[in-house]
Amino acid sequence: MDPFIAQQLLNWLVLSSIYALIALGFSLLFGVLDVIHFSHGDISMVASFVALGSMQYLLASVLPPGSGLALLLACLLAIVATGLLGIVIDWLVIRRFRHAPAMMVLVATVALGAVVRELIRTLYPQGSNPKPFPALIEGSTWIGGVVVTSLGVFIIVTAIVLVSGVALLLRYTMLGARIRAVAEDRDVARLMAIRPNRIFAITFFIASAVGAVGAMFYASYAGVVRFDFGVQLGLIGFSAAAIGGLGSMPGAVLGSMLIAGIETLVQATLADGASYRLVFGFVAVILVLVLRPSGILGKPVFVKV
Amino acid sequence: MSAPLLQVRDLTIRFGGLVAVSEVGFDLGHDEVMCIIGPNGAGKSTLFNMISGIYRPTAGTIALEGRDITGMPAHRVAVAGIARTFQSSRLFGALTVLDNVVIGMHARTRSGVLDALLRPRRARAELREAADRAADLLRSLSEDLWARRHEQAAALPQADRRRLEIARALASEPRLIMLDEPSSGMDDRDTDALISDIRAVMAGRPGLSFLIIEHDMRLVGAFPERVMVIDHGQKLIEDDFAAVRVAPRVQEAYLGYKAVHA
Amino acid sequence: MNPETATPRAPGAPAAAARGGRLPDHLIVAAIELVGAWLLAVFLLSRTTWLIVLVLALFGAALVVMRLRPAIEERIVAAFGRARITALVLGGAIVLAYPFLLGGNSYAIHILIIGQLYAVLALALNFQLGSANIPNFATGASYGIGAYTSALLAVTFGVSFWLTLPAAAAVATFFGFVIGFPSMRTRDTYLALVTIAFAVVVHQLMNNFEWTGGPNGLVGIPAPSLFGHSFNSPIEIFGYRAPGQANFYYLAVALMVLSIVSARRLHDSRVGLAWNALREDELAARCQGINVVWFKMLAFGVDAFLAAFAGTVYAFYVGYISPDNFTFLVSVTIMTMVIVGGMDNAFGVIVGAFLLTMLPEKLRVFNDYRLLFVSALVILFLILRPQGLFPQRLRVYGGRK
């Protein structure tokens, strides 16, 4: 295979993986809570900053410099912290809108995203400036004329593991069954002694934690992170989940691959591709939704992995 | 016999592999009333949905006064003269009772965007006149509803919601009005009131035809001249109420084969 | 500022109330308008934080009082309904004299202009969001298309401002229909996403095309002129002077009046009813003969039309525009104004727009925390009073007794 094409395919897979991790959160939250959680992208991006901050702290105080352990610990901490943040956000804000009309929740979560972004910007030292983000894994190899970065492979593998993990969780575990029950009909689930609020918290944790991984991959892949990266990432993740069909997990993956595919294609073929990738991506979103108004695999019920 | 108002021939609709209505056909003349009965899920509402333009039939034809309206979109069917009510009264809850009826007149009023913006006086005059007619219509149907005409529709009790829905349907001056289980959720007293309301409407509007889907045999018994039975999407029989009641096929449909032939 | 009520009053209302109303009505109207204008001036001109907060608190207190005693609100609304002539004449006089009453303070006038432009945008969106419940995140894009069209015409071809207005409106309305087309088939969240996608695409295109000036946008948009009087030069009347801004203030007022009148006329018409019907129950609306597709497209068109006017005025006022003025976040801001102000309530929407424009400006003392504060406020508001400041009013036709 032509190395150039192979390279692009690889880029496509990496980008798909990153987007899929964010899209998954959107689909999960929509399927289970019926909520368009617009601030999901911003909340996920908090992870990058938590990771950066704690890594610097660890290196400065506890661990020897240059220690890879610092990065690892920082990332794990960030994932957990973001998951918990998701739970807190739900408990503080989203919970109040359980029975509100959809438009209201939409605007509220958009405002919420702004709040999260501004908090990052004001609380993190010199938050307005972009910060370099370390590559999670260094190194690359050449295979048949294609540059394969270890980071890229790691991203793809982790995404597959996480997405499958969540899918298996939903399908084969007791917890998964409960989540699906609440997604179907939360009042009937209550009759089965399932507590919806607890399920919501768990769902938020999973969605936010997985999103955290995606955001950190994004930052690592780009090499830099800024407080408002969450907006664009969230928008793309939301679009991916929507064109795949909100509430459908394979849909989220499919949508991500579609958008990532268009971006990669545009970037590779057009001279000024980089600046047009969003345009083509979102035009595709419009086209898909016009042709399949509820998304490609769209169904309101969140089930069937 | 006068030319039929409504002519339905071989009407069929398939949803994927499921045939919901199969080759149903009937004629309905002017000033006629026909009740449609059948077990739950038989396809009666689906039949209404096809006639009113919400669903597109897979096969068959529907003609209104000789004009083919098969597959015509719902809003044009309304303008053509068919009005309907819904099993779960679909009112415009946040709007006033009067608003609901005025909207019912949409098909018979004409002001558009340009009229509203550039000739406001004419547009407002038309709307005011429609409101007056709507108020009169309400009053003729129910003094109580008329008294509450400036309240929100969502605040009405069940029986009044039905009446309001009927008023809204009548507002478009239809030639055919289709009532989908108008007595559902009502007790005997309310049903009797409903029956007399329908009779009053019939008396006040000669020429208006009725198609009524019903489960409550009390109401069917009040309009027994023509009854059609639908089961599993198919037309079983069409006759007067007395004959339909004792037909073995009908009893089978409701009670099961064994119960009838045990 | 002219607090027109949103309650429609048919001209054929019972004779006793139609002729001018009673003295108390006039007094109530005059009092509210004068006090309101005075407080607004204090708010706009003041530099001391506590005074600003005090005015806000007064406003908040008034709202609370009206909520606790709805009879008061009804009385005020009735007064405005009956003493209409007084309301309009006095209100009009205040509005026209306002730049002079503010002592020619450029900054205050600037805030008023921006506030009014956003009020126009909010009214435009209100047709879709408030009346018809269509979640349109692309108002910012229409705003931008209008601005860019007029700016390009003026800068590249030297077209006069007054001619660019209809051109911009036509182009934006065309694109309004283009975006309205997919609205036929998509619903709710997916529809919202389509409009967001459209907004992003438009924004990116503005950013990338060279002939739109790229990320730097267009500069040097000439000030309009009317009968030889350039809008940049100050206004002098009877020895009183107002800065050049005042010209644009009056332009904005004209646009506001146009928007309010359009909003009223459409809301109180068969069209407004049809929109409300399709908002409540689309299926039932169709069965009443309402061509839902047409009315949805209409909503998109009207929104784009007014937004384009606002964009044109903005472009010529500020003199330069860039793509970042028209992002999807701008659309969100407009949407917030509609929801906070009160859906399908023209007065509420205007108040919402003014609040959300003026608050961040006057609370500059918080400076860095402005956006955070306003966003948090919005969330709080949505939790506590979701129906908005001024919820939709029921129609009264003044029908026969």
Image (cartoon, rainbow, N blue to C red):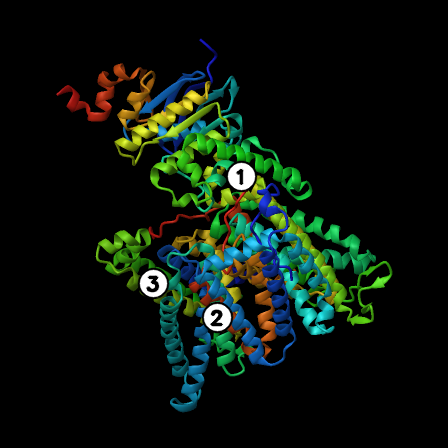
- Observer-nearest residue: C75 or B14? C75
The spot of residue C22 in percent (x, y) is: 60, 53
Real-space CA distance between mark 1 and mark 2, rounded to the nearest whole angstrom: 45 Å
Residue A203 shows which numbered tag? 3
Give the residue at x 47% y 57%: C71
Q: Secondary structure at mark 1?
A: loop
Residue C376 shows which numbered tag? 2
Mark 2, residues whose alpha carbon is within 10 Å: few (<14), some, or many (≥20)? some
The spot of residue B238 in percent (x, y) is: 33, 16
**Would you place residue A245 above or below residue C316 in this image?**
above
Give the residue at x 17% y 21%: B260
Q: Marks 2 and 1: in contact by CB < 8 Å?
A: no
State whether discs 1 and 2 lie on one chain. yes
Real-space CA distance between mark 1 and mark 3, rounded to the nearest whole angstrom: 54 Å
- Nearer-N-terminus badge (1/2): 2
State whether discs 1 and 3 lie on one chain. no
Residue B193 in sight in this render = yes
Q: Nearer the viewer, mark 1 or mark 3?
A: 1
Pinpoint the chain carrying mark 1.
C
Amino acid carrying label 3: it is Thr
Q: Secondary structure at mark 3?
A: helix
Q: Which of the 4 quarters of the picture holds residue C291? A: top right
Say whether residue C232 is left or right of residue C282: right
Real-space CA distance between mark 3 and mark 2, rounded to the nearest whole angstrom: 24 Å
Q: Nearer the viewer, mark 3 or mark 2?
A: 2
Give the residue at x 53% y 61%: C336
Amino acid carrying label 1: it is Gly
**Can you name the residue that lies furthest to the right here?**
C228
Which residue lies under the disc numbered 1? Answer: C399
- Observer-nearest residue: C84 or C346? C84
**Would you place residue C302 above or below residue B85 in this image?**
below
Q: Which quarter of the figure is the N terminus of chain B placed in?
A: top left
